[in-house]
Every structure is written in structure tokens, then in C-alpha cells.
Image (tube, grey):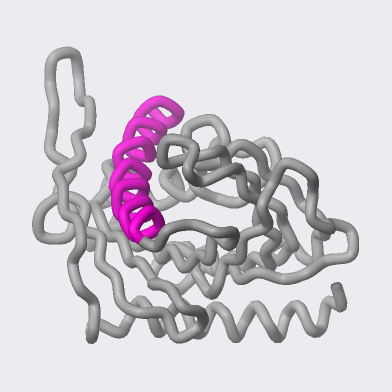
Amino acid sequence: MDPTLAAQMSEAVAEKVLRYRRDTAGWKICREGVSEELGGKGSRRPLRGARNGVSVSWRPSVEFPGNLYRGEGIVYGTPEEVWDCVKPAVGGLRVKWDENVTGFEIIQSITDTLCVSRTSTPSAAMKLISPRDFVDLVLVKRYEDGTISSNATHVEHPLCPPKPGFVRGFNHPCGCFCEPLPGEPTKTNLVTFFHTDLSGYLPQNVVDSFFPRSMTRFYANLQKAVKQFHE
């Protein structure tokens, strides 16, 4: 992929995802839950996220006939520790704890913060959703307040045609923000945006129920991973 075009595309995606973060209008809560952090032996602490633990909201996508999902919750761990568990990296921690990621590879490394990647996912929803793969342009950004973000969107790449055994899905502008909490250096406000066309022939009710449940589990599993890898 042409580096100049990739840089232009990725910055436009990052601007769009940042607008999602700042825009509070039109979101409808579809799932709330209290995740738990395992503290010392025998202790359990509620993961206090948006209002009540993890909050998942949605609104209609303007990119495709589906929904844009927004998750928010507080994770016990510094932004760097949380980022270490979610960052897109070959041999990274994500594939070790995220039940929805079975593989990650770099198709083209453009800069230290920009790449084209392929992510594979397992079957889900009692195998109603078969394995998928996604080819994305991914940009990592760091903001002056200490926030670290990933910003991604689907691209086609000649080195990564569709592969047998996978349905090619498409991520529209999506990403996450690992945000520091003022006065709480050991906690991170994690805001995630899932904006995925799973493709294939799936009943809409299967898709609509999959993402909110999956995102809630994502936060719970991430909290366990931060504890496991950074304590």
C-alpha cells in the first residue's frame, strides 16, 4: 500500500473515531453490567465503569447497514498496562486473552505507528458465526493528556487475498482509547468502538445480540489479563 495514501487514510480514520468519542448524541444503551477484578485472595472488587460497570451503547452506522457499538468501562491498570494488553502487535498479549482473536499478523509495516494487519477470529454464537478474518489499516496515536488510541478501517491488500476457511469481514472506522483518570494513576478509562460488518448470510438478530455480549466479556477478560500480566 502506498505510504502517502495510507497516512492520509489513517489520519482521516483517526479524526472520525475521535469524533465518535466526543459525540454524545444518539447513543442507546443496549447492555450494562458490573465486571469484577480479582484482587487478593478471596477479594472481589467491582469494575466501576460508565455509570454501572461496563456500558455498551449503539447507534446506526452511516458507513454500512449495521450498527456502531460503543463500550466504556474503567480497568484497574495504568494506560500503558492496559494498552500493552490490547495493542495490535505480532506476538502480543491480545491473542493470549481475547477469546475473539485467534491470530494477528502484519501484512505491511509502514511506520512504527502505522501498518496493515490481518486479524482472524473463531466461530461464535454457537457456531452460527463461522471464522472470520479482517484486513485493516491501523494507526496508533498518543495524545498530550496521556491517552493512547488505536484507529482502524478495512483495506484491500494484494498480499492478503481471501483465505480458505474464513469469511472476509470488514471493519469500518473503529478503535479504542486508553484514557488516564485524573488523580487515579492506577486506573484507565477504556472506550472502545466496534464497527464491524461480519459479512456472509447471518440473521440480523444474531449479529445484534453478539456484539453487546461479546463487548461485555471483552472488558471482563481484559481486566483479568491486566492483572495476570502486570502484577
Quarter of the view holding residue 25: bottom left
- Residue 106 in percent (x, y) is at 76, 51
Q: Residue at x 62, y 60 (%)?
A: 169
Answer whether residue 172 is visible to the viewer in this image.
Answer: yes
Q: Is residue 150 left or right of residue 89?
A: left
Q: Is residue 22 above or below residue 181?
A: below
Q: Which quadrant of the figure contains the C terminus?
A: top left
Q: Residue at x 85, y 72 (%)?
A: 1
- Residue 217 in percent (x, y) is at 32, 41
Q: Residue at x 34, y 58 (%)?
A: 205
Quarter of the view holding residue 117: bottom right
Question: Quick one: 138 or 76, which is closer to the camera?
Answer: 138
Q: Which span is picked out in magenta?
A: 205-231
Q: Is residue 55 left or right of residue 64?
A: left
Q: Is residue 216 magenta?
A: yes
Q: Is residue 108 left or right of residue 166?
A: right
- Residue 63 in percent (x, y) is at 51, 82
**Can you name the residue that lies furthest to the top here?**
41
- Residue 10 in percent (x, y) is at 65, 78
Q: Is residue 2 above or below residue 52?
A: below
Quarter of the view holding residue 39: top left
Q: Is residue 153 above or below residue 100?
A: below
Q: Residue at x 87, y 78 (%)?
A: 2
Q: Is residue 220 magenta?
A: yes
Q: Main secondary structure of the magenta part?
A: helix
